[in-house]
Image (tube, rainbow, N blue to C red):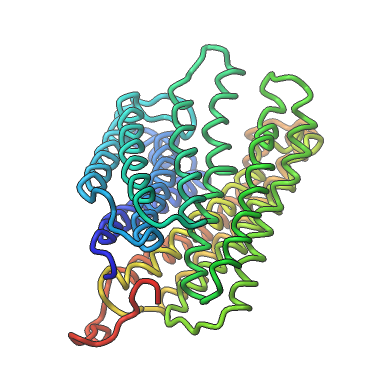
Amino acid sequence: MKYQSQKVAYWYFLAAMALFGIQVAGGLLAGWIYVSPNFLSEILPFNVIRMIHTNALIVWLLLGFFGAAYFLIPEESEREIWSPKLAYLQLIILLIGTLGAVGSYLVGIHGGREFLEQPLWVKFGILVAALIFLLNVSMTVLAGKKTAITNVLLLGLWLLSLLWIFAFINPDNLSLDKMYWWFVVHLWVEATWELVMAAILAFLLLKLTGVDREVVEKWLYVIVATALFSGILGTGHHFYWIGLPGYWQWVGSIFSTFEVIPFFLMMSFAFVMVWKGRKNHPNKAALLWSLGSSTVAFFGAGVWGFLHTLHGVNFYSHGTQITAAHGHLSFYGAYVALNLAIFTYAMPMLKQRAPYNQVLNMASFWLMTGGMAFMTFVLTFAGTIQTHMQRVVGDYYMDVQESLSIFYLMRFGAGAAVVIGALLFIYSILVVRKDEIIAPGAATAQPGE
């Protein structure tokens, strides 16, 4: 390893992959309940399974982001992490909080706010862990070399952590409650997380393609500017029907339309960098995940987001399976695939080996991506039918759900493909066959190569 403290990232990636497995398993279980609604209804209610599914998603993505920061910041700053001990303490706090939250959900203790159901003590634990992280990475960057990648990454992570404070605000007024709730949820996934995504993607493409840093940095700043310009006021597309002033319908519609731009730029950025690149990097799987992430993010977050973001359309479609289609594909493309890209790139180096199991890794990409694409199409058709039957014709909700049963069965099949792909990915990352072990002294792909 070029920097010994980069090994911290290994344990973050391990914890993230463990939660990734739990998350997709929970999603598959929730998918089956759509097919057979009474399944486990008295032992493990649907609302608890859904909480575990969504909370595990958020936590493992954050663990991936933190691990990616601990991996790339030493290389970019050209110095060791300020305090590896604090990094390990942060990980322990996050894991204890995760176990505490799941345990609370299983016995019926939760906050009742979607994605923010964590008990108060867990929320405080997450805040403490975030502050530890910010101190650690900020001190590392301040003492070392500054680059556009670290600047954007730190901006995204600082804003991400500070926005968590709104999770503690829970007013009695439902409209205010939802407004503050979206300050966390939307401004995470459609603003600050986009900055983190852009920084990690830029780092990967810089290493995998060999393009000049100046080119990467120019693209990065343009992407960041468009993400913040569109994402902040784009929050308005969640304010349409929650009791806020009517002008948000126009503000939300206009700026949400602009939210397609940063994702289109990220996709273009990735392919242009590969086209201009002059390096034949041995880790083809990491490049596939990087290109796949930017492409699927454009369709999931950009195209599928635009399909129902205008207030005239959203009036009929909000809260239907169209929302679920957009949510699944956008999260998978923008953040899941990106984390899997950095895992694929970094883990062989962290284990001091050349890239391994690349065929299995790439097979997992196509299995997961194909499954998620099919799931998205199925849910889009289901949501379109649901919108017409329920919101236009006015049919009874449960009658509509019964009519959608064939779509839910197909969605379950797609989910099974995603789970198999996820397990294949974890195997390809963690298991090294005997014929892939590098002899002592043999050359391996080191960070920066």
- Residue at (40, 77) in percent of width and height: 449
- Quarter-wise, where is residue 422 in the image? bottom left
- Residue at (40, 69) in percent of width and height: 345
Relative depth, front residue between 214 and 35: 214
Relative depth, front residue between 415 and 312: 312
> How many labels were placed on the picture?
0
Residue 367 in percent (x, y) is at: 50, 69
- Residue at (59, 62) in percent of width and height: 294
Q: Is residue 418 above or below residue 444?
A: above
Q: Is residue 436 above or below residue 221?
A: below
Relative depth, front residue between 417 and 89: 89
In the rendered image, the quadrant that contains the N terminus is bottom left
Residue 216 horizontal side relative to residue 99, left or right: right
Residue 279 in percent (x, y) is at: 51, 82
Question: In the orientation shown, which residue stands out farthest toward the top?
Answer: 172
| Residue 377 visible somewhere in the drawing | no
Residue 146 in percent (x, y) is at: 44, 55
- Residue at (67, 59) in percent of width and height: 265
Residue 129 horizontal side relative to residue 176, left or right: left
Residue 63 in percent (x, y) is at: 36, 49
Question: In the orientation shown, which residue stands out farthest toward the left?
Answer: 440
Relative depth, front residue between 367 and 11: 11
Q: Is residue 394 above or below residue 322?
A: above
- Quarter-wise, where is residue 90 in the image? top left
| Residue 161 visible somewhere in the drawing | yes
Q: Is residue 208 above or below residue 101?
A: below
Residue 361 horizontal side relative to residue 399, left or right: left
